[in-house]
Image: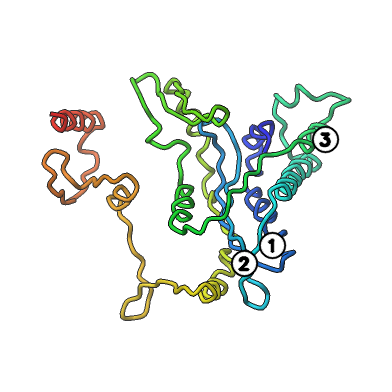
């Protein structure tokens, strides 16, 4: 959506909640005309690569879905049609809030308004623009699809791998500039960096990840078995002798190995496997931990 609307979400936090549903409705409406129910996964992000405010939706959907008679039917979506539907729904969201008298308008926009150029005129101007709605080509590489979706689950505003330098006063990180398509360095004071980072922490209880269509919680138990059958797949369920599903516990060490290829339970000096014994909170100050880590790092370097 246009950058003019980004700051408005921080002034009107309640507007964050409906936009995932609005995005899903665009796809569901087009699919309904083809008499199919698709599977939809949505991740909402409020940040750009340089930590600026940039409210946008990542939506993944199947290029097909279930028909009323329980069959699978392939469909496709037109990018320009989706753009027009998305544009209408977002503009209507702000227009409705304005009519209700609940919308807080940013000072930057207020300065542009007068008796001949009202807020409705401002929205009309945005409505006449082409919005950026990018549609990727459908992929049959399921491993790649899962990897792509996995990046958006609990994703922070900036990855640790982008951080390049910290000297106690300033933080430097790399980000991809979409205009030049090149990586650039961005340096901020500690206070500026923290301020830009924490503004993207969602409100307590807010769901950044949402599911619609076949994946919606109220119908997935009924529809997913049908999908597995149509696609010739079997749902993997680990059960015990009482035929109860086993929930596998994922440890921090397992996640570190899968994500970064680093086993935190391997000694950095001799390579021996470490055994977790216990946690004793409060016995060591942070400064002491940093000092110990620094000495270990020097030994490892030698």
Query: Residue 65 bears which disc, if any?
Result: 2
How far apart in space, not on screen, are marks 3 and 1 (Cα)?
31 Å
Q: How is the image coloured?
A: rainbow
**Residue where numbered disc 1 is placed:** 31
Q: Earlier in the sequence, mark 3 or mark 1?
A: 1
Query: Residue 186 bears which disc, if any?
Result: none
Q: Is 113 drawn above or below residue 278 in the view shown? A: above
Q: Is residue 140 left or right of residue 161?
A: right
Of tags 2 and 3, the one toward the viewer is: 2
Quick one: quadrant of the N terminus?
top right
**Residue where numbered disc 3 is placed:** 120
Disc 3 to disc 1: CB gap under 8 Å: no
- Quadrant of res 35: bottom right
Tag 1 secondary structure: helix
Q: Where does the image place residue 33, in percent across and percent down from the top left?
A: 74, 64
Q: Residue furthest right?
A: 116
Disc 2 to disc 1: CB gap under 8 Å: yes
Q: Where does the image place residue 122, in percent across and percent down from the top left?
A: 79, 31
For disc 3, the neighbor class at 10 Å (few under 14, some 14 to 19, many from 20) is: some
For disc 2, the neighbor class at 10 Å (few under 14, some 14 to 19, many from 20) is: many
């Amino acid at each position: 959506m246009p950058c003019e609307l980004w700051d408005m979400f921080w002034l009107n936090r309640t507007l964050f909640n409906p936009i995932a549903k609005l995005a899903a409705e665009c796809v569901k409406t087009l699919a309904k005309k083809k008499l199919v129910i698709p599977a939809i996964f949505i991740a909402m992000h409020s940040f750009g690569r340089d930590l600026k405010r940039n409210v946008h939706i990542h939506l993944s959907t199947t290029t097909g879905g279930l028909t009323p008679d329980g069959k699978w039917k392939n469909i496709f979506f037109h990018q320009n049609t989706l753009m027009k539907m998305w544009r209408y729904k977002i503009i209507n969201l702000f227009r409705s809030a304005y009519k209700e008298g609940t919308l807080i308008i940013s000072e930057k926009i207020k300065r542009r308004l007068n008796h001949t150029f009202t807020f409705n005129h401002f929205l009309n101007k945005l409505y006449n623009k082409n919005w950026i709605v990018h549609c990727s080509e459908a992929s049959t590489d399921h491993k790649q699809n899962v990897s792509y979706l996995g990046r958006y689950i609990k994703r922070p505003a900036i990855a640790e791998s982008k951080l390049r330098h910290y000297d106690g006063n300033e933080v430097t990180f790399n980000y991809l500039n979409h205009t030049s398509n090149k990586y650039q360095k961005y340096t901020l004071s500690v206070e500026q960096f923290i301020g830009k980072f924490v503004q993207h922490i969602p409100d307590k209880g807010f769901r950044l990840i949402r599911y619609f269509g076949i994946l919606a919680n109220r119908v997935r138990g009924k529809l997913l078995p049908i999908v597995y059958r149509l696609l010739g797949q079997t749902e993997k369920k680990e059960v015990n002798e009482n035929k109860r599903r086993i929930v596998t516990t994922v440890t921090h060490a397992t996640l570190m190995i899968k994500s970064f290829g680093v086993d935190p339970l391997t000694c950095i000096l001799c390579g021996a496997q470490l055994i977790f014994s216990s946690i004793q909170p409060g016995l060591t100050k942070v400064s002491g931990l940093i000092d110990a880590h620094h000495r270990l790092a020097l030994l490892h370097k030698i």
